[in-house]
Image (tube, helix red, strand yellow):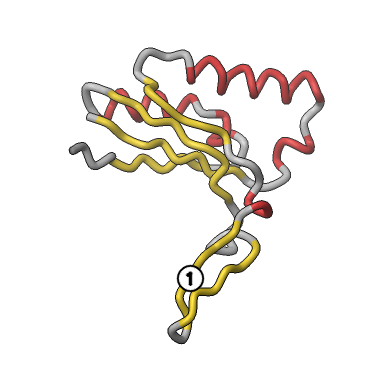
Amino acid sequence: MKLALLINDRPGTYDDLEPAERDAVYGEYFAISKDDRVVGGEQLLPAATAKTVRAAGGETVVADGPAADTPEALGGYYVVDVDDIDDALELAKRIPAVRLGGSVELRPVVER
């Protein structure tokens, strides 16, 4: 089964870390990406760099910034291929964003 692990960070979380702590956190992300169950994924630039496209009044409108103003922002994702949801949960619990005040949303991927 394939799932996307959507990593939601609290903006500014990593700014408060000492350089060695930040490097250690990035090392944890890198280690997860090397797990055989991880088949894809990327880190995203901050939400402030986003553009959002909507339709309003028959027009297409492009706005700067993310689609939603929330306390967390999508910071990246992994795509995993696992035997069951417990395998995916084990990986999700290792993602540093969880212990740093963020969250990880697990969403099944539509397989064609």
- Residue found at x 74% / y 22%: 21
Left or right: 25 with respect to 20? left
Residue 1 location (% of width, % of height): 22, 29
Q: Position of residue 8 (x, y in %)?
A: 53, 44
The picture places residue 99, in percent across and down from the top left corner, at 57, 33
Q: Residue furthest front?
A: 59
Q: Residues within 10 Å of mark 1 (few under 14, many from 20)?
A: few
Residue lying at 30% horizontally and 23% vertically, measured from the top left: 87
Mark 1 lies on residue: 54
Horizontal and vertical percent position of residue 71 = 61, 56
Extreme residue toward the left, this view: 112
When asked about the image quadrant of residue 17, the answer is top right
**The C terminus lies in quadrant:** top left
Viewer-side residue, 60 vs 75: 60
Vertical placement of residue 60 versus 107, above or below: below
Seen in the image, is 9 located left or right of residue 1? right
Outermost residue to the bottom: 57
> Image check: 6 left or right of 44?
left
Describe the element under mark 1 as helix, strand or loop.
Answer: strand
Q: How many marks?
A: 1
Give the answer, above or below, for where 33 lies relative to 61: above
The residue shown at (55%, 62%) is: 52
Of residues 56 and 20, the one nearer the viewer is: 56
| Amino acid found under the numbered disc labelled 1 | Arg
User: Which corner quadrant of the image does residue 92 belong to?
Assistant: top left
- Say if 73 sits above or below 31 in the image: below
